[in-house]
Amino acid sequence: MTKIIAVANHKGGSGKTTTTYYLGLALAASGRNTLLIDFDDQATLTNKLYKAWTPGQTTIADVLDGMALATALCQYDVGLQYVPADHRLAWIAARMQASSPNHAFLRRAWQRANMQPEYVLIDCPPSAGVLLINALALADWVLIPATPTEESYAGVLRMQAMIQEIACTLNHPVKPLGIMATMVSPSSISEQKYLNLMGEMEIGRVPRRVGQTADAELRSTYAEVAKTVIRILESER
Ligand SMILES: Nc1ncnc2c1ncn2[C@@H]1O[C@H](COP(=O)(O)OP(=O)(O)O)[C@@H](O)[C@H]1O
Ligand SMILES: [Mg+2]
């Protein structure tokens, strides 16, 4: 059965897109057929993934507007596909906001697509608006990337409240998968306080990596995170 994970935190710059990208690569490298959905109108994930920009490429904005999801699929690697985003997602979101109910646009698009990848990762936008609600209304799980800082940890608490709210108001049991501690500098004392607060909700830790070796180091760190995610989700009945 497909496992759908929303990668979400209200705080921008908490590592959502980086986590979606490297976790997606790692799941695909572990033989799991994986689909990434860029659900942020800033299209940071799309810009990371596009091998060649195609003018007029169908994006998630068109899919929310009624086009088939299959028309927006792009192949990135073996076992790894993605649905790109562009700035028009903000316009569609404004239209979605005005309709009622407005939480099930993505869910309906997904049901119409009739696809069965093993994993779907949704790279969520930083705002708590209609796009995030649509992502949570489809997802089975929420992975919360957070830097060990006050603002990012506040985003974790707001996400946890929102998960409960979605469960109650939409009767949709989206579950917290855990917190990814991102951009951690092990020597920092102030960071330790927030790592302690994350406690047993922390399912992985990514050091701050810069420079020429960053890509290789992030790949190997997220490969370990993927093992944890696979262990948790594939031992689930
Ligand atoms: N482990 C890391 N080490 C160093 N820089 C990182 C790391 N993870 C993310 N970054 C950088 O931090 C910035 C914000 O990350 P991003 O994943 O785009 O966050 P978000 O999607 O939550 O806004 C980006 O410039 C990204 O390259
Ligand atoms: Mg992002």
Image (cartoon, rainbow, N blue to C red):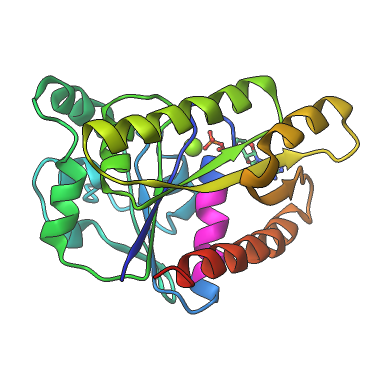
By secondary structure, the bulk of the magenta-drawn segment is best described as: helix
Q: Position of residue 96 (x, y in %)?
A: 15, 28
Q: Residue furthest bottom?
A: 31
Q: Is residue 176 above or below residue 34?
A: above
Classify residue 148 as left or right of residue 152. Answer: right
Q: Quadrant of the N terminus?
A: bottom left
Q: Is residue 100 above or below residue 49?
A: above
Confirm whether the magenta stretch covers residue 59: no
Residue at x 63% of width, y 60% of height:
225
Classify residue 136 as left or right of residue 125. Answer: left
Front residue of 31 and 5 = 5
Front residue of 58 and 100 = 100
Q: Position of residue 106 (x, y in %)?
A: 20, 45
Residue 12 in sight from this viewpoint: no
Q: Is residue 210 above or below residue 29?
A: above
Classify residue 17 as left or right of residue 220. Answer: left
Q: Quarter of the image holding residue 86? A: top left
> On the rendering, which quadrant does ligand 1 occupy?
top right
Q: Position of residue 89 (x, y in %)?
A: 26, 34
Residue at x 71% of width, y 59% of height:
221
**Stretch in magenta:** 19-27
Residue at x 26% of width, y 42% of height:
137
Classify residue 177 as left or right of residue 71. Answer: right
Q: Quadrant of the C terminus?
A: bottom left
Residue at x 55% of width, y 59% of height:
23
